[in-house]
Amino acid sequence: MYRIDLHPSTGGDTYIDVGSSPFEIPLRALLPQRMTNLLPAAKNLGTTHITNGCYRLHPVEWNIGEAAGALAAFSLTHSTTPHAVSADPAAVADFQAQLVADGVELRWPEVRGF
């Protein structure tokens, strides 16, 4: 639950720092719309300028990388594609269970006082 901190913008603001709510990164953010068999592994996922203020921090980047690598392995093991995994709720549940079994955080507990 990192704060959203945005650096200089075209609007003339020199710095924007606001609290955020706990967030999760949807699996579909790892899937390019026009390409297959290519996964982002850090800051290059599908995001907006606002949400990038949270996604760009190192622990989140590392988590994205873990998820991308695990998704590639899961897809190969199950003879499918990342897009097909994302489109099938049962496959998403299986993939998430595998992430949890591997010790990958799916969500962080809410931290108060920041």
Image (cartoon, rainbow, N blue to C red):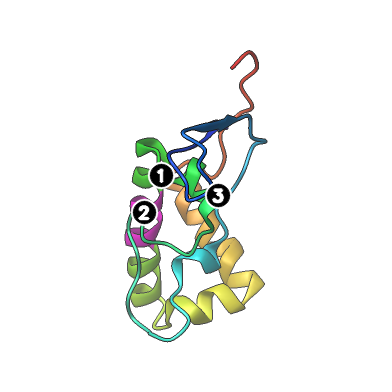
Q: The C terminus is located in which quarter? A: top right
- Earlier-in-chain disc, 1 versus 2: 2
Alpha carbon of mark 1 to alpha carbon of mark 2: how far?
6 Å
Q: Amino acid at mark 1?
A: Arg
What residue is disc 1 on?
A: 56
Q: Is residue 97 left or right of residue 35?
A: right
* Front residue of 104 and 22: 22
Q: Helix, strand or loop at disc 1?
A: loop
What residue is disc 2 on?
A: 43
Q: Amino acid at mark 3?
A: Thr
Residue at 42% across, 81% down: 81
Q: Residue 86: give x, y in percent of width and height.
A: 55, 73
Q: Which residues are magenta?
A: 64-70
Q: Amino acid at mark 2?
A: Lys
Q: Residue 1: give x, y in percent of width and height.
A: 57, 32
Where 79 falls versus 43 (above or below)? below
What residue is disc 3 on?
A: 51
Residue 2 in magenta?
no
Q: Residue 104: give x, y in percent of width and height.
A: 43, 44
What kind of secondary structure does the magenta stretch mostly adopt?
A: helix
Where 81 falls versus 8 (above or below)? below
